[in-house]
Amino acid sequence: MIEFRSVSKEFDDGTVAVDDISLVIPARRVTVLVGSSGSGKTTLLQMINRMVEPTSGTIEIDGENIAGIAPVPLRRRIGYVIQNSGLLPHRTIIDNVATVLYLEGVRKPQAHERALELLSTVGLDHALATRYPSQLSGGQQQRVGVARALAVNPNILLMDEPFGAVDPIVRAELQQELLRLQRELAKTIVFVTHDIDEAFLLGDNVVILGEGAKIAQQGSPSELLANPATEFVASFIGADRGRRELTIRRVNGRSVVIDGTGRPAGVLAETDGPAS
Amino acid sequence: MNLFVDALAWLFSLDRLIGGNSIPQRVLEHAGYTVLSLIVSAVIAIPVGFAIGHFRRGREVTVALSGAARALPSLGLLTVLALMLGLGAAPAVAVIVFVVLGTPSVLAGAYSGIESVDPATVKAARAMGMTEWQVLWKVEVPLGLPLLVGGLRSAALQIVATATLAAYIGLGGLGSYIFTAIPLRQYDVMLGGAILIMVLAIVIDALFAGLGRLVTPRGVRHRRRESERSLALSARPARGTTL
């Protein structure tokens, strides 16, 4: 569990990126911080591994104030994935995955063994191990980024718009892959995005942020859809434009579901069980 | 044309191979001053350049200072220093003059190499838990090395050309052929000496070109080739907007 207590961040130029935020991020769930650019969501994320220091307030991981943990060891036990992967261009894929293992003093043969395992975990062919990042596609690089973040088996995974720079098809693939990984690994994932659809797809818990990282509303995707707390939230999730509304039309005795733009989205399966 | 033939005749005369004024002897002196000055420049400029590049601070001041020093005419500086420190300190004077000349290039190569590294890569390295020292040595230096070698290369060229002046304060080197030939109007010797300096410069430049290729990390070489290829194919449709 990660807990923000009245956390604020004012940058040297006077910009208040985060304004007195209290937030509990549950363990072993995916929490998505979603907001438009400038909402301070990345700043919030980077305070968890002390890439950014809060101006005031405290952040605790499992009850321990992180201000008391030196940044370097703290970062080594938290996985971090960013847009464009941030791989080291002069190192092979296998060495990139093993980076944190090397930093922790793991010997090369063991580190390589573990790195190969991780490549399988993220669905990459071992033949890629000896390639360089520039020889991989954007989607493959992003998978390597995830493998690297998982190397020391951290409990917490921070993901900063990790799928922002790949094309929509690859993005959909990576999103499914992340959901699969999460079913297996059950990490505490904090995921930042500006894409509300991505947030609803991946998040167990979605936090919608306004300016200054003010929490506009927090809840499961269905809670947010059912009861948007404010106009801002309604407009952000697209409820105000009717985008989220589905209507049912009877066609030849079946119930066809029509989406907000008037296109048929599917056929209603008429069972008594709960919709999953 | 006659002059050129005379110069070649002078160069390839067997007399050039013997005695204290022989070509091998003068080449050794010349190369010795060049290498020594380059090493001193590197020892001064590389740590400073790395620090500027890593901390992204102090660049303007350092560039202004070293640039101003670089603007001093070498011959004037040599004369003034020799008069101040005396001819006994001639070797030190020569090295100081060449170091003043070479340092700005090495400095520029060192900091621009570090600054050329993608900030996202550096940030990711830090976020993974590298110490500042590890960020420098494992990420910034290996990726910045080609530009540093470029800086050393241009410093070496400037020094090897200017080391001609060592002869002006009696230190030998290839400049001694030129300086002794001027009052005697031995144009063949002057041209011969100039040719020797040119050849030495070309050899040193080629050495650094090879070194530059050697220190370019493999993954980055791939990227260069790749980006050339993608430039050729750049007529791709723009990415569609997401809903």
Image: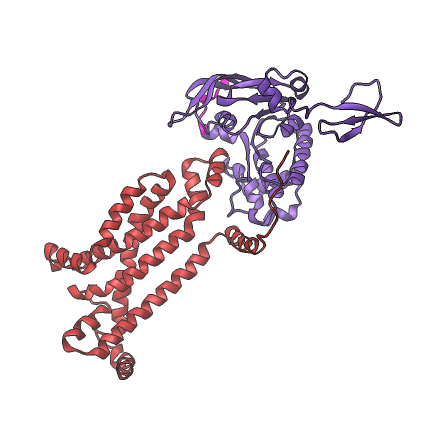
Chain colours: A purple, B red
- Residue A70, magenta (yes or no): yes
Closer to us: A81 or A9: A9
- Occupied quadrant, residue B30: bottom left
Q: Position of residue B127 (x, y in %)?
A: 49, 33
Residue shown at the point (41%, 21%) measured from the top left: A55
Does residue B115 sit above or below A225 in this rendering?
A: below
Does residue A61 sit above or below B89 in this rendering?
A: above
The N terminus of chain A sits in image quarter: top right
Q: Position of residue B160 (x, y in %)?
A: 28, 63
- Residue A85, magenta (yes or no): no
Residue A64 can be seen in this image? yes
- Magenta residues, as a range? A63-71
Closer to us: B74 or B34: B74
Residue A68 can be seen in this image? no
Does residue A220 sit above or below B160 in this rendering?
A: above
User: In the picture provided, is A172 more to the left or to the right than A12?
Assistant: right
Closer to us: A240 or A153: A240
Closer to us: A56 or A275: A275
Q: Position of residue A9 (x, y in %)?
A: 44, 22
- Occupied quadrant, residue A203: top right
Residue shown at the point (30%, 54%) measured from the top left: B39
Q: Position of residue B207 (x, y in %)?
A: 39, 63
* Number of numbered callouts drawn: 0
Residue shown at the point (84%, 20%) measured from the top left: A271
The C terminus of chain A sits in image quarter: top right
